[in-house]
Amino acid sequence: MRNPLRRSRLLALLGTAALALAGAVALPGTAQAANVLTNPGFESGNLSPWTCTGNLGSVVSSPVHGGAKALQGAVSSSDNAQCSQTVAVQPNTTYSLSGWVRGSYVYLGVDGGASTWTTSPSAYSQLTTTFTTGASQTSATVYVHGWYAQGTYYADDISLDGPGGGGGSDTQAPSAPTGLATTGKTSSSVSLKWNASTDNVGVTGYDIYSGSNNVLTVSGTSATVSGLSPSMAYTFTVKARDAAGNTSGASNSVSVTTDAGGGGGTGFKQAAPYLYEGWGDPPSPSTVMSATGVKWFTMAFVLDSGGCNPAWDSTRPLTGGVDQTAINQIRAAGGDIVPSFGGWQGSKLGANCSSASALAAALQKVIDAYSLKAIDMDIENSDEFENEAVQARILTALKTVKANNPGLKTIVTFGTSTTGPTYYGNRLIEQAQSLGANIDVFTIMPFDFGGGSDMYGSTVNATEGLKAKLKSTFGWDDATAYSHIGISGMNGLSDQQENTTPAIWTQIRDWANSHHIARLAFWSVNRDRPCPGGGVVSNCSGISQSNWQFSSITADFTG
């Protein structure tokens, strides 16, 4: 690994020289000076038109320097989470670059020009530098980044003061985008994708239009337009632009009618208790299906067998073993499965695959092996849930497989507090929005709260907290937010001795049906047998119940 301290001393010397040189050049006059960056304080709630290496950047609501949003860079040991924006500038002109940053070894600079840095782990501090454009320069790329393995950084209120571009020699517009199509919709949003444009210098962004209104600007070739009205027809086009401000012609148009407000969302409903072939005297799934009417099972857990290769529990073969036997039995009885990747422990693909593309390839192996309609990422513990870089890797991989497998539903499952998502849950949701991951269902696990006695009330409160977060992050109405929610409980005694009885689980199911959520699950069918006073064990619930009673209750979930 390169030495950050050595580079810091060098940059300090270079910064001093750059400032001395800048002192001999007059800054633009006050009338011309303006911040030419777009979304400088990230108040739009998304990154656009900033782009971040490794998909490690996201917009957060805390900590901020000003306003309500800031940039967060999830630095890893191999990626400094550099976020950058290219803007049009004028030749032979001096610009002033400043920004507020927080973290260990945070850098602010311009490609090919001046940069500056600071270390301020616990408070925001301001960085400022200047640079002068070249004789024929018409664009500049501003960046901010942290340092390898030095922890998460934050940036806010970044400013590039000077005259805007447009007077340079680049007058050639990009080609018009092609292949504009919709990839999904809800009652309040439409997701779009298109083919990249070309340009003699380089495309820096795409403007999405609804009719004649520019409603969103992004740097990539996909976007989700939010804040729309239910049952309303919209016509979208896309234009490309370059750093000099040249704009292409419009793409083909695509017309979309949003879903009805009362039934918006994914249209995906799933009652799928966990079935685990690794321990707990796994029951015959056909026996459970015949006795209860349940059709779906969440099969646990797909892990890493080494080298980013998927296997059941890391040790059982992906195909040809007891898990495939159970899946074949379920499908023969008219049911289906959703595999769960991850869990609380073990060697997880999300943490061990080296990149989002490698993780997507591992997921694709499982999708292909079983012709899957849905996959679940159970994101837990410090190696995945509390690792911001791994969160980004998982969400980016899910975005990739969703795009490559039309109709595939993607689910993320994570822990919660009694009032809704925790810090890392909120960050997961914010990052899903920022990355355009288009997750179908956000499933919380409302148990192991710490001994809470009111499991029905705590579950409802936690779910309402999730609903509020989804609404504020995605701009959804109540119905759409509920339609993207899942609940995954723990039948009988939890690890912390909370007791979800059949009566309580029936209340939770009825509430879930009345609010039309997307998914209901519990851990696990292996434990769906009586053993009053048996404690928390793998093959029974620890309470008095009948065989498969929780599965029967869950089977009546319709959403």
Image (cartoon, rainbow, N blue to C red):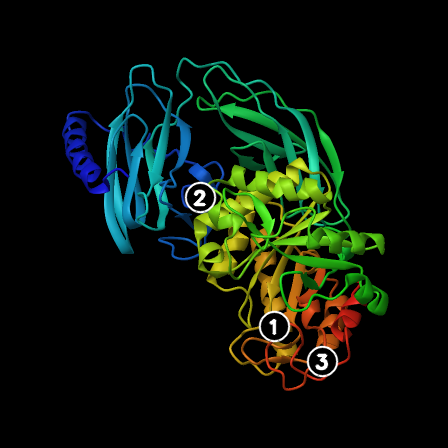
For the residue labelled by badge 2, is the local secondary structure a helix, a strand or a loop?
Answer: loop
Residue type, label 3: Pro
Of pointers 1 and 3, the one earlier in the residue sequence = 1
**Residue that badge 2 annotates:** 56
Residue 87, position in %: x, y? 41, 28
Q: Quadrant of the C terminus?
A: bottom right
Identify which residue, 503 or 130, lies in the foreground.
Answer: 503
For marks 2 and 1, give the one nearer the viewer. Answer: 2
**Residue that badge 1 annotates:** 461
Q: Residue at x 32, y 47 (%)?
A: 149
Residue type, label 1: Asn
Query: Which label is found at residue 192?
Result: none
User: Does residue 264 appear anywhere in the picture?
Assistant: no
For the residue labelled by badge 3, is the local secondary structure a helix, a strand or a loop?
Answer: loop
| Mark 3 surroundings: few (<14), some (14-19) or many (≥20) residues within 10 A | some
For marks 1 and 3, give the one nearer the viewer. Answer: 3
| Mark 1 surroundings: few (<14), some (14-19) or many (≥20) residues within 10 A | some
Q: Quadrant of the N terminus?
A: top left
Residue 445, position in %: x, y? 60, 66
Residue 50, position in %: x, y? 45, 37
Residue 278, position in %: x, y? 62, 61
Q: From mark 3 to mark 2, how far is it between C-alphas?
A: 46 Å
Asked whether, in this view, residue 145 is left or right of residue 450, the answer is left
Dots 2, 1 in contact, CB < 8 A: no
298 over 17 or under it: above or below: below
**Residue that badge 3 annotates:** 530
For the residue labelled by badge 1, is the local secondary structure a helix, a strand or a loop?
Answer: helix
Identify which residue, 325 or 118, lies in the foreground.
Answer: 325
Q: Residue at x 34, y 41 (%)?
A: 145
Residue type, label 2: Leu
Q: Residue 508 falls in which quadrant of the image?
A: bottom right
Of pointers 3 and 2, the one earlier in the residue sequence = 2
